[in-house]
Image (cartoon, rainbow, N blue to C red):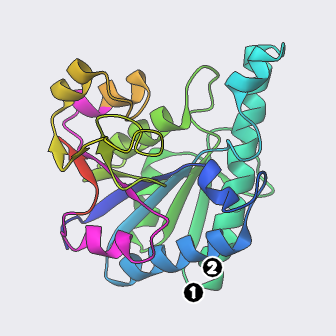
Amino acid sequence: MKYKRILLKLSGEALMGEQSYGIDINRVQQYAKDIQEIHSMGLEVAIVIGGGNIHRGLSAEKAGMDRVQADYMGMLATVINSMALQDALEKNGMKTRLLTAIKMEQICEPFIRRRAVRHLEKGRVVIFGAGTGNPYFTTDTAASLRAIEINADAVLKGTRVDGIYTADPEKDPNAQKFEQISFTEVYEKGLNVMDMTAFTLCQENNLPIVVFDMNKAGNLKKLAEGEDIGTIVS
């Protein structure tokens, strides 16, 4: 195995599948099976999911909503997605724990770093919900922060594209893919990998980021085994 402990970052939009809104249960089940594959091989797995399939704070702010209120709504959306994935993981035989940055005692545990690490050591899949618990921070930043806190070996960012390109491959057919790129090069080329706060956190703590296509079944296992899937930023 290439890694011992990883943090998997999933976008909320990816959970929509072919729908225009909400949660596609088939997509969530596919993700759960992929995660179960690497977990059964002994990999310690922590997960952060976005909430863009339900609510986006920035979009709501542009429509006239107070940014802080909108961001807290977005945090609650990530908890809904986390609960959906938790259910799918447990149906695949995994033991899980959902830890959130906002207290919700009836459905999850509060985030405590030592408790999260202990859950991972005991073989549980740990899902971090509600972002950092603070407005103005994205779930990318939450993923980077939690990965550093639990001493993960890498952040694996599962998207619908198979890596980092010179331009948006869905819009520009001539876009060239990077197999590997440095943090400095990403800055210089102005590439959109994560938001700047999240990206800087990873750079300052020497935490590699791997961007890959999560929607292709089996990619996560190949990546965990060391195959050159996606693009690595290091």
Q: In which quarter of the view is residue 5 placed?
A: bottom left
Q: What percent of the width, then of the height, locates residue 62?
A: 75, 15
**Horizontal arrangement in the rendering, residue 72 relative to residue 184 (left or right):** right
Q: Residue at x 65, y 58 (%)?
A: 15
Q: In which quarter of the view is residue 184 placed?
A: top left
Q: Residue at x 77, y 45 (%)?
A: 54
State whether residue 79 is above or below residue 3.
above
Q: Residue at x 63, y 31 (%)?
A: 133
Evaluate whether residue 152 shows in this view: no
Farthest residue to the right: give it: 64
What quarter of the picture does the C terminus occupy?
Answer: top left
State whether residue 39 is above or below residue 130.
below
Q: Which residues are magenta?
A: 202-228
Marks 1 and 2: in contact by CB < 8 Å?
Answer: yes
Q: What percent of the width, then of the height, locates residue 47?
A: 49, 56
Q: Nearer the viewer, residue 155 or 19?
A: 19
Secondary structure beneath label 1: loop
The residue that disc 1 covers is 93
**Horizontal arrangement in the rendering, residue 21 relative to residue 227 (left or right):** right
Secondary structure beneath label 2: helix
Q: In which quarter of the view is residue 219 placed?
A: bottom left
What quarter of the picture does the N terminus occupy?
Answer: bottom left
The residue that disc 2 covers is 90
How far apart are the alpha carbons under marks 2 and 1?
5 Å
State whether residue 219 is above or below residue 6.
below
Q: Nearer the viewer, residue 169 or 50?
A: 169
Q: Amino acid at mark 2?
A: Glu
Q: Nearer the viewer, residue 205 or 234?
A: 234
Q: How many marks?
A: 2
Q: Amino acid at mark 1?
A: Gly
| Mark identifier at residue 44 | none
Q: Is 156 colored magenta in this rendering?
A: no
